[in-house]
Amino acid sequence: MIDIAILRKQPELVRELVRKRGSGVDVERLISVDTEVRAIQTDLERLRHERRNLAANGDRSQAQRLRDDVAELETKFAVLRDERDGLWALLPNLLPEDTPEGEDDAGNLEIDRWGDLPEFSFTPKTHEVIGAELDILDLKRGTRTAGAGFYYWKGDGARLAWAIFSLALDFLSKREFVPMMTPQVARRRTLFGTGYLPFFEEEVYKIAGEDLCLIGTSEQTLVGYHDDEILADTDLPLKYTAFSACFRTEAGAAGKKSRGAFRVHQFHKVEQIVFCRPHESEEYHQQCQRNVSDFMRLLEIPHRTVRVCLGDLGAPAYKKYDVEGWFAGFGMYRETHSNTNLLDYQTRRLNVRCRGAEGTFFPHTISATMITDRAALAILENNQQADGSVVIPDALRPLLAGQREIVRRPGP
């Protein structure tokens, strides 16, 4: 959430923010309730002080009367504070002045492009066709076992995916990210704190009868790792990475763009998370972006980077880049990464503070995809050969015992 002092000192800025971001928050009601909450809090402090003085002077009857008044006011305060906090938590994050205008991803602004697009003497196939022919990606049995949106990596497909994720973790370890293995579930408070609830409620798999949800990304558990803690300023930046399965309902996903294993209910990801000082968040946002671009080049995947526009920016995000890899069979760039500077939006919600020589502050967080299964899908489409085989990028071959290509292997 944003600093409530901004609402109190610059209400017009918040009104404009809510308008631009299409938020439904009633800012006037929020201002009114916040004002009342602060007034009641002042009255409570005064009455509690009076009651202590009366009790100390032996005036028990007056102290008892004030106790009843305090109890009544505390009840009113709690109701209004909860309303205030609920509205406050729905406010979207701040925006940089240079955020591109646009209503959806068509308005995203391309800022960089790398790699020559592959050329073929044949019509390139999409990943699901290649995967089925090579018997390395099984959507049919995934659907039979778990329903639509689930799949199996198999044989050299599983080895390729593991090689990508292993290489990514090694790559980030060399850049001083601490690897972690996190829970695959999280409490609703953690999802609220990281900004996934209530904004993406429809995407969350909830566990019946438990205050637990399947994680949609290890961002949730990596940022939640420091929930309600006070960090030392000298420990910053904290840089974490994790591989995890990720679960999202993908409500409403359908059509050509969702075919195959591109938009699914379960996928796998290596994530980058940074906790840093506020004045350094732009620097680490750019560092995470370089990590993504460098790794995509290592995998030899042509890609472009876009600055995400206003209409495609989720409420918790301040500034965001997407990277889109080239998919030859599909014939276009498709999103493979997101990289978001969230300022102190998450740390305020989770009460993660940092203490230094100049006082206590809320650190900023960066959340950036390092790599997902989509990289393997892009490799299948971009590296396919006329004989049906797929060439393995050079950087992955040492993790695959020197194997140079994937071919159909005999088996059931």
Image (cartoon, helix red, strand yellow):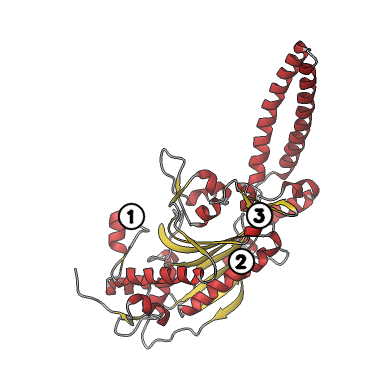
Provide the secondary structure element on which disc 1 rests.
loop
Residue denoted by label 2: 308
Residue 209: percent from the left, percent from the top?
41, 38
The tag earlier along the polypeptide, 3 or 1, is 1
The tag earlier along the polypeptide, 2 or 3, is 2
Question: Disc 3 vs disc 1: which is toward the camera?
Answer: 3
The tag earlier along the polypeptide, 1 or 2, is 1
Above or below 73: residue 122 = below
Question: Disc 2 vs disc 3: which is toward the camera?
Answer: 3
Type of amino acid at the residue the image marks with label 1: Gly
Type of amino acid at the residue the image marks with label 2: Val
| Picture residue at 41% right of the left edge, 69% below the top | 166
Residue denoted by label 1: 147
Mark 1: few/some/many CA within 10 Å (<14, 14-19, 20+): few
The disc placed on residue 109 is none
**Cα separation between marks 3 and 1:** 38 Å
Mark 3: few/some/many CA within 10 Å (<14, 14-19, 20+): many
Residue 56: percent from the left, percent from the top?
78, 18
| Picture residue at 68% right of the left edge, 39% below the top | 84
Give the residue furthest to the bottom.
Answer: 121
Using residue 20 as the reference point, say whether residue 201 is left or right of it: left
Q: Is residue 120 visible?
A: yes
Residue denoted by label 3: 344
Above or below 369: residue 146 = above
